[in-house]
Image: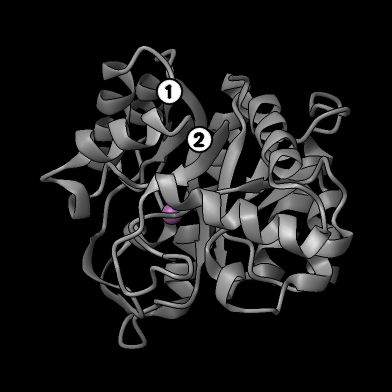
Amino acid sequence: MLIDTHAHVNFSAFKDDADEVIRRSLAADTWMILVGSETKTSKRALEYANKYEKGVYAAVGLHPIHTHEQKATGDDYDFNARGEEFSYDVYEKLAQFKKVVAIGEIGLDYYHLDPAADPAALKRRQKEVFLRQLELAKNLKLPAIIHCRQAHDDMLEILKKFRKDYKDIMPKDKAWGVMHCFSGDEELAWQYFTLGLNISFTGLITFSAKWDDLIRRIPNDKFMIETDCPYMTPEPFRGQRNEPILVKKVAERIAEIKNLSFERIAEISTNNARKLFNI
Ligand code: NI
C-alpha cells in the first residue's frame, strides 16, 4: 500500500468528482491525508475523512497564502486568496476530531507577496500565524505539515527557536513534522532533519533531476511521498489534473533513483507516514 501524505481532493478542482477520485485511490490501496488551507477547506477535508471508515485522514490549518487577501498565480494554479483572520479556537475545535492527524498546511510563503502591499507587514503576519499554529500542534500533540516557499531563512530561525523553547517536551525519537513538497538543496534538507523534521517528495522529482543526489543519500526514515494534487502532476501525466492514485509515480521514481524495489519504497514511505501521523 501507499499513503499520499498531502492531497487536496477537498479543493474545488475536485468539486464534481471528489468521492470518485477517493474511491479510485482506495481501490488501488492508496490512502491519503487531505490537507486544508483555510477554515472552509479544512472543514471539507474533515467531512470527507469522516465519510470513509479508513484510508482517508485530514489535516487542518491556515496556509500562509490565505493570511492576506491577494491574487495567487503560478504554473498550475490561479486563485484569489481570502485573507482569513486566524482563530486558534476554530482550528483547535476542528483538530479534536479523531480523523484529524496533523495541523497543516502552515508555514511561510514569500513568493506571492503583493508588492503593492507592505511586504514587511505581510511577512510579520505570516510568521505570527505560523507560530500560533505550531503552538496548537504542540498543545494537541499533533505533527505539523509545513509549507515553505522562498522563506527558508525565516523558517529555520522560527523552527530553531521553537524547538529550543520546547526541547523538553518535543519527541526525541521520532519526527514531529514534515517539510512538504521539499524543493531545497541537500544542505537544507539536513538542517530540517537536525530539527526533527521529515521531508516529502512530489511529482516534481519525476521531471527534474535536481533532487536525485539527495534521494540517493537520504536516510530511509526521513522521507515520505505526496501528490499535492491537483498540482504537481507527475510524468507522464503533466498538464492533467493530479490525483492521489498518481503518488505511485513518485514512489516509482524514488525506487529507480535509489535502485531499490518499488515494494521496498512503498513499505519505507508508508511506515514513515504511519509513524509520523499515528495511522
Ligand atoms: Ni499543499
Badge 2 marks a residue whose secondary structure is: strand
Q: Where is residue 108 shown, x and y percent of the image?
A: 53, 62
Give the residue type that dot 1 points to. Ala
Q: Which mark is residue 103?
A: 2
Q: Which residue is mark 1?
A: 95
Say how the picture is coloured: one colour
The answer to whether residue 175 is visible is yes
Q: The N terminus lies in which quarter of the figure? A: top right
Mark 1 surroundings: few (<14), some (14-19) or many (≥20) residues within 10 A: many
Residue farthest along the left direction in this orientation: 16
Q: Percent from the top left, x then y, of residue 203?
A: 52, 63
CA gap, disc 2 and disc 1: 7 Å
Q: What amino acid type is highlighted by mark number 2?
A: Ile
Where's ligand 1: which quadrant? bottom left
Percent across and percent down for residue 44 are 24, 33
Q: Earlier in the sequence, mark 2 or mark 1?
A: 1
